[in-house]
Amino acid sequence: GIQVEQSPPDLILQEGANSTLRCNFSDSVNNLQWFHQNPWGQLINLFYIPSGTKQNGRLSATTVATERYSLLYISSSQTTDSGVYFCAVMNSGGSNYKLTFGKGTLLTVNP
Amino acid sequence: GAVVSQHPSRVICKSGTSVKIECRSLDFQATTMFWYRQFPKQSLMLMATSNEGSKATYEQGVEKDKFLINHASLTLSTLTVTSAHPEDSSFYICSAYVTGGPEAFFGQGTRLTVV
């Protein structure tokens, strides 16, 4: 099946810093989503971005499908940004809307 | 975005008993829902695909008799952990797509502890 690798596994920032999270995938995809899992376990939808660039406030994401990677940018980080960020993809050749998750990036933003 | 609600959010049960977890799509209909399991500090692993009006499809290695799934309506899927054991303790999360939509939406998750 498709492989999803996220880097870095852990990231510690001071409040106000910027960061870039990366997601590499091993095959063509027709769905790529970024999620933030908060400390209570809830997965928050950040972006649906199988290709191109999107921005939402301090967050933006870029997916280069031909090169099989996606980047999530967090600017001016806040303590509330802490949590695990997951990238999840759906293989173009797959079926039934199954998402494969990466292992996540644990982000800690210190005040 | 669409809202998926899970209940309960936390449950503690005794070893040998069964526990039912509900997943509801609140503002849309979902012919297909998905159940994931997450161990501490690990990623989400797909357990099964729940299909309204038909049998669930289980991923390799998931015991279908242990994890019973019922998708009785277009807005409700249930996961029953039967004869629970401590090793079944985990975080269980469901998801659903708005029909024809590209994004998956997730419930709040259920933390199951078997003692």
Image (tube, rainbow, N blue to C red):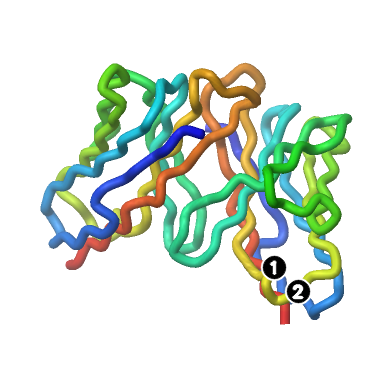
Foreground of the two, A23 or A61: A23
**How far across and how far down the image is residue A13, in percent?**
16, 60
In the visual, does A14 lie left or right of B35?
Answer: left
Could you tell me the amino acid type at mark 1? Asp
The reply to whether residue A53 is in sight is no
**The quadrant where residue A107 appears:** bottom left
Q: Residue at x 83, y 38 (%)?
A: B71
The answer to whether marks 2 and 1 mark residues whose Cβ atoms lie closer than 8 Å is: yes
Q: Which residue is mark 2?
A: B85
Q: Residue at x 22, y 58 (%)?
A: A11
Foreground of the two, B23 or B49: B49
Is B101 drawn above or below residue B110 in the view shown? Answer: above
Q: Which residue is mark 1?
A: B88
CA gap between label 2 and label 1 equals: 5 Å
Is B5 drawn above or below residue A69 in the view shown? Answer: below
Does dot 2 land on a helix, a strand or a loop? loop
